[in-house]
Each structure stands twice: as structure tokens, then as C-alpha cells.
Image (cartoon, rainbow, N blue to C red):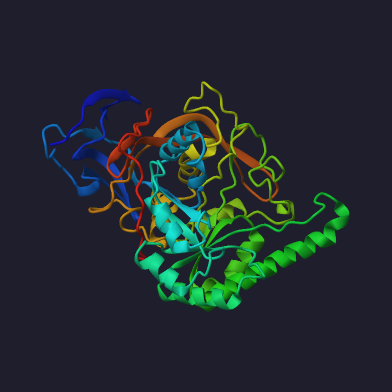
Amino acid sequence: MATFSVVFAKLNGNIYLGIKHLVMDYVLIKNGKIISDDEVVESDLLIGNNKIVAIGNGLERPEPETPVIDAGGKYLLPGAIDTSISFGELCQVESDIQVRFNQAEVMGGTTAIIETMMPGYSLNATSELINRRNKKFFVVPDYSFHLALQGWEGMTAKDIDYCYSHEGITSFFLQWPLLESYSQAKLDELLQVIAYFDLVIVLEMQQPEIIGYGHPELDVKYKESIDEHLRQFRFIISKIIKYGCRLCLLGLSFKEQLDIIDEFKEYGLITAELVFPYNIGGQDRYEVNEDSIFSGFSLANRLTLIPTDKLWELLHEPHYFLARPLINLSGEGIVKDSQVNNRPDEFFLLKNFLSVVYTAGVVEGNITISEFASIVSGRQSKLFGLYPKKGVLKIGADADIVIWDPDFERNLYCNFPVGMKGESKSIKLHGRPDFVFARGNMVYDGENFTKEGCCGKYLYRSPV
């Protein structure tokens, strides 16, 4: 028997059942447009015991008191997956920051997150992983880790085997640049094991640095620094590809890096997370300077941003998806005592990310709604071993569901470049989640967040 109470609520002119308690057996979603691979099917969907238990037309309530949501005219998307968020640090700060982080992820439709796990209190990778897996992080989305290869005491092939076979780790983080003190023979051994199990190497893009940034007389050194950066990049990729490892590049921003990736395209082993060059409000032009979202990349103005048209072209391919915005990149980053959900804070871009991608992508005709769902969820789930538990709406999958209102207009504007000469285009944001379910628990209803009973769980993963 389900335990809950329901009330009627009017949102955007439609009548919904608002679910006030999260402990339930079933929720029936009627008349939604379910996004599945390359098709959109209008159908009903039944949630039961944290899973999707039925999809079809004319589904009835399994119990008289089963809550029903009318999703007519709305899309049903799989929950988004954030593959590069540092949530562990956030769980060690003040509780109000944790709350805002959870709200931002949920408001952005996120139901799963993956963090890079670097060496911490323990120098042993397996013991640290077990400790992190058992720790209560108090994050709403389910979570897992990319396990760093370097920095541990005596990382061995047996450690890789154990972390994959027993702890469900399918992705391993490689620090760049490679430290000279790190044994190349040991790295080669680990890469062979990772390739054997068909696991993924994760490489976060690093940008070249040079002392004396801003002095024109250092142009030659700038060029040498960029050339060395690209040489190292090519070397690392060739080394990983040599052993047949799958490689995921996080935070790809520049055309020069993309040109090197194209040299290895024939192997079909490289996936890249693209940085989406946008901002929300407050700027008339998009520029690469100390105030832009590329601030901190000292040589960004010496490299070439991937053109917008090329970015959309890449996103039609299954080997590319979009990076979530880094935290603390919102406008002014001001947090007030009277903070409310729609005010800018350090998570402002994160909570509006899906609306930005939907507006710039689907509304502007650059991608389809199916590609939208794939870019923010499906491709990540398959690459990192979460499919078919996450990233898809099918019977047996976790009930991580976003009911997406395509017609909702925000009083915010997205600014993004339209070409290589700095021109920018400003578009009013469209679309938002009306409801977000995390493993069958309704954690957001378009206005209110609920955290009781929806603490995220550790995810065991397996290569597809």
C-alpha cells in the first residue's frame, strides 16, 4: 500500500497532482511524449518501486490512490548525468551550500553524478574507494567515481581488476601532464589491463601556462608553449590508443585540440566532452577574457575556440556530448541571506544548463529533441557503464525522469557566439523541468524541492 498524500496544484494552466510525501509504490504519468533513442512516442509511463514498470497507451492506476500526473504536451526525458562535478568538496562545506548544490542539480534535471577521486586520506586506492562508497554524501543524485591512476601507493593491475569487478568502477582518470617521476612501465601495465576489461581512460583537458602572460614580446614563447602543449597532447593520445583503451576527454574547447583528435578518428576510441560557450544575461558580447567562462586559461586567446557551427555538427555524432558548467561561474556569484531559487548564485549556470542547451539547440533547430536527451544523458550512460540502468526510459530502468515543459519561457537570455569574429546572439530561454524524479522519488515539482527520502546511492557500473 502506498503511503503519501496528494493535493491538486495549478501550474502553467494545467491541473496536476502534487505529491507531498515521497514514500510511494506507484506514480502514473499520462500522455507524455517519451524520448527514446531516435523516436518520440506519446505514451503513458508507470513508476513502481523506484523503477519504470510499464510503458504503453491507456495504462490504468494499479491502486485507487496511485498519484497521476497529466504530462500532455510535455516531454519525458531520462535524468541528466553530470560526469565531471566535484561534489565531495561541497559535502564538506556549510549545509546551505550543499542545499543550493542539490537544488541546482535537481532543477537542472540531474539524477546521476560522477566525480574524479584523487588520493585522499588513504594512499591505497581500493581502501579509499571502499571508504568513499560507504560514505553518506547527502547528495540527491546517485553518484560514482572516476578513479585516478596516479598518486596512490603501489597501484597495480590487481587493483584495477578489484575496483572494476567488485566496486563497479569503469573509468580511470589520468593526470596530465605525466609526472617524470611516474613509472612509464607501470602506466603501460595499467593501460593494458584497462584495455583488456574495455574500461575508459578519462583525461581532463589542460591548457598551456607561461610566466609573463600579457607581454607582447613573449609571442615566441607563447608559440613554443602552445606547440609543446599540443605535442604532449598528441603523445598522450597515441599512448592510450596504442593499447586499445577507450578515451574520454573532458572540457574540450579549442580547434587545435580537435584537429589532433581527428588524426586518431579512425580508431573509434575517442569520446569528447565539449565546453558549451555560452553565458546567461549581463553581457552584450561573448569574449575570451579574464571575465569570460574561459578565464584562467592563460593562452585561450592564442588558441581558437571551436566555432559554434562546428560544435553543433560534432554533437550530431555519438562520440560527443556537452560539459556541465563549472560552478562559481555565474554572473557576480552573490549569495544573500534572503537567497531564493531564481537568484544568481555560484550554481546559477548549472541549474539553467538544460534550458540553455534546449534553447540554443532544439528551439534554434540545431539538434533534435532526441539528440538533446542523448547529449545530456544517453551518451554518458553508455560510455561510463550506467546503461541501461540510467540514461534511458525503458521498462526496468531506474525511474530517473524529467517531465520537460517545452513552452515555458524564462525571463533570462542566453548569449552565445555565432561565428569566429566575436559576434554574439541573445535568445530568451525556453523550457524547464516541470517535475524531476530520482529513482522514483519526486524531488522537484517545478517550484519546490524535497530532500527527504531521496539521498543518492552509490552506483555500480559495467561496460556496455
Please tell me in which quadrant of the rendered image residue 239 appears: bottom right
Q: Check the image and name the residue furthest to the right.
A: 217
Task: Depth check: give the residue in front, 169 or 443.
Answer: 169
The answer to whether 102 is drawn above or below residue 341 in the figure is below
Q: Position of residue 405 (x, y in %)?
A: 37, 36
Task: Depth check: give the residue in front, 388 or 102.
Answer: 102
Q: Which residue is drawn at 25% across and 30% down?
A: 21
Q: Which residue is drawn at 24% across and 39% down?
A: 31
Q: Position of residue 12 (x, y in %)?
A: 35, 26
Q: Which residue is drawn at 55% across and 30% down?
A: 344
Report whether 57 appears left or right of 22: left
Q: Quadrant of the N terminus?
A: top left
Q: Check the image and name the residue furthest to the top.
A: 338
The answer to whether 170 is drawn above or below residue 7 in the figure is below
Please tell me in which quadrant of the rendered image residue 406 appears: top left
Q: Check the image and name the residue furthest to the front.
A: 122
**Count of numbered circles in the view:** 0
The answer to whether 344 is drawn above or below residue 461 in the figure is above
Q: Position of residue 195 (x, y in %)?
A: 45, 74
